[in-house]
């Protein structure tokens, strides 16, 4: 070797000596092995023989108990013991047998492998023990050589591993079914996305970051993100993720194959309705094949849930558009402003929300009530399409005949909406709308029409829409009156508490409108 080569070699050796060692791979969690025997030597020998045992690169971690009672305490502290070497005769002739029965029947532990050992085989015949106790092996101590002990332990650990994987898979399927049911109950994308994080957390305890994104016409954007991947919804991916993480997502979208790396995974959420979505999970170490298949199965359910929520939103949007179009028929005929029906629906919903937040009529107001009352509020005057224009647009007071004609709109509207509601096999905004259309001119003191209902006889939704309708009428300019200010309208409504309106509805409405921000 030349001097130059020698110096290079020496430099390399010095660099190798001085270079920091590569980080060691984290040690795998050991198998817990419980030795239950009243003989100290048995504990010592078992530990010595099995000290080098390794199954799936996992070593044994030994626990000791010297009686059946002490073993019960250890089992109460460790529910993940893989193998128990169990002596039969300890504080009593059947202490080990009683412990075996306690493990299977009282603790309900079917996973742990029990190897029964006895120094007095004649006292506990093998066939009788096998027939009457749920154990996995039965050996006389005299025949249990070091080789046989090692073989029995290795076999028992592999058996425990296989049972554990099958059981984990079964439980994983059960969690996925339960999770899917909860997710599929979410009716909007916002509700669905909000429910995803806790469901992923329950399936992946080590999760540290979670991001959902979608590949749209304007590039890949965040749907939701938290933890070490936190980013605002709608953000372009380039503004919130590192280049390497973006490359992972692009690779999955291009290749349509999931990516599982050392400390994260990227899973495709294929869509039947448009752009594909991706879930990026950090803090989840490279999973075993079983865990990976369960995660992919779960993400398949999530993909379906995304599509369902999106389609449901589209149906709701089309439904709202149809309702607003119908509401505007009556609005235009009545000479109302372009935002009237939207405003009344919004006020009704906000009033109902105020009541729910304070537990008022909590037995009647739930999340579906909000959506239904908003649409019912839009349709409350649909019956006015049957009223002649000369009456609706008369600049002065109505005479008796004209008033009778005007009052017919509540029956016309209710009849129309009930006929439509009959085409649906469950209560919807149409059935609530029929109630609202018929009863929104009833009064708390019984002086309203068409039936003169009073107090609690008036449907709650009709009472809420009625106060929103009156407020809107007061603050609008009509051909027969000027617009009132918000303060004037509020003062009049407050004065009508207990007469026109129920006091609790007045309180809720005034709480909801606040300083007068009533824009829809």
Image: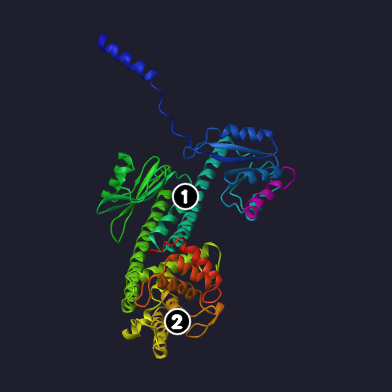
Q: Is residue 493 visible?
A: yes
**On the rendered structure, is 355 left or right of 215?**
right
**On the rendered structure, is 44 left or right of 378?**
right
* Closest to the observer, 52 or 316: 316
Q: Which residue is mark 2?
A: 438
x%, y% of residue 409?
39, 84
**On the rendered structure, is 62 left or right of 348?**
right
Cα–Cα gap, marks 2 and 1: 48 Å
Q: Which residue is mark 1?
A: 201
Q: Residues within 10 Å of mark 2 (few under 14, many from 20)?
A: many
Judged by depth in the image, the label closer to the viewer, 2 or 1, is: 2
**What residue is shown at x 32% (from left), y 17% (from top)?**
12
Q: Is residue 122 visible?
A: no
Magenta: main secondary structure equals: helix
**What residue is shown at x 36% (from left), y 57% (from top)?**
303
Q: Residues within 10 Å of mark 1 (few under 14, many from 20)?
A: some
> For the view shown, which residue lies furthest in the top direction?
3
**What residue is shown at x 68% (from left), y 41% (from top)?**
119
x%, y% of residue 177?
46, 60
x%, y% of residue 68?
70, 44
Verify whether residue 301 appears in magenta: no
Residue 15 numbered mark, or none: none
x%, y% of residue 193?
40, 56
Verify whether residue 93 appears in magenta: yes
Mark 1 falls on what kind of element?
Answer: helix
């Amino acid at each position: 070797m030349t001097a130059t080569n020698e110096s290079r070699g020496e430099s390399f050796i010095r660099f190798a000596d001085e270079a920091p060692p590569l980080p060691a791979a984290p040690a795998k969690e050991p198998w817990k092995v419980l030795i239950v025997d009243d003989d100290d030597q048995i504990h010592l020998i078992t530990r010595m023989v099995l000290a080098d045992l390794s199954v799936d690169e996992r070593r044994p971690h030994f626990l000791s108990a010297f009686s059946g009672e002490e073993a019960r305490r250890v089992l109460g502290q460790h529910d993940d013991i893989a193998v128990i070497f169990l002596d039969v005769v300890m504080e009593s002739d059947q202490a080990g047998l009683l412990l075996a029965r306690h493990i299977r029947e009282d603790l309900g532990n079917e996973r742990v492998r029990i190897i029964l050992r006895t120094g007095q085989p004649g006292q506990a015949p093998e066939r009788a023990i096998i027939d009457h106790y749920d154990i996995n092996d039965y050996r006389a101590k005299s025949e249990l050589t070091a080789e046989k002990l090692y073989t029995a332990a290795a076999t028992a650990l592999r058996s425990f591993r296989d049972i554990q994987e099958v059981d984990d898979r079964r439980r994983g399927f059960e969690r996925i079914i339960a999770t899917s049911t909860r997710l599929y109950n979410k009716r909007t994308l916002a509700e669905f996305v909000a429910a995803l994080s806790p469901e992923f957390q329950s399936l992946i305890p080590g999760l540290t970051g979670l991001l959902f994104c979608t590949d749209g016409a304007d590039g890949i954007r965040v749907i939701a993100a938290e933890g070490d991947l936190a980013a605002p919804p709608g953000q372009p991916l380039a503004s919130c993720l590192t280049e390497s993480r973006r490359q992972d997502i692009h690779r999955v979208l291009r290749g349509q194959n999931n990516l599982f790396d050392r400390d994260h995974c990227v899973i495709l959420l294929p869509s039947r309705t448009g752009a594909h979505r991706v879930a990026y999970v950090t803090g989840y170490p490279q999973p075993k094949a079983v865990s990976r298949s369960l995660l992919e199965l779960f993400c398949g359910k999530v993909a379906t849930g995304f599509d369902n929520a999106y389609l449901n939103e589209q149906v709701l949007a089309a439904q709202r558009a149809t309702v607003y179009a119908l509401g505007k028929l009556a609005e235009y005929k009545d000479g109302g402003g372009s935002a009237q029906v939207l405003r009344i629906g919004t006020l009704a919903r906000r009033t109902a929300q105020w009541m729910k937040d304070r537990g008022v009529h909590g037995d009647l107001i739930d999340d579906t009530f909000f959506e239904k009352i908003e649409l019912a509020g839009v349709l409350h005057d649909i019956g006015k399409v049957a009223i002649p224009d000369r009456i609706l647009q008369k600049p002065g007071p109505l005479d008796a005949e004209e008033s009778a004609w005007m009052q017919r709109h509540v029956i016309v509207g209710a009849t129309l909406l009930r006929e439509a509601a009959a085409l649906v096999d469950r209560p919807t905004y149409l059935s609530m709308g029929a109630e609202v259309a018929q009863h929104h001119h009833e009064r708390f003191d019984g002086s309203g029409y068409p039936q003169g209902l009073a107090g609690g006889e008036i449907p709650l939704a009709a009472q809420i829409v009625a106060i929103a309708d009156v407020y809107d009428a007061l603050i609008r300019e009509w051909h027969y009156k000027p617009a009132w200010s918000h303060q004037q309208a509020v003062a009049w409504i407050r004065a009508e508490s207990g007469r026109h309106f129920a006091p609790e509805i007045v309180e809720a409405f005034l709480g909801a409108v606040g300083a007068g921000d009533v824009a829809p």
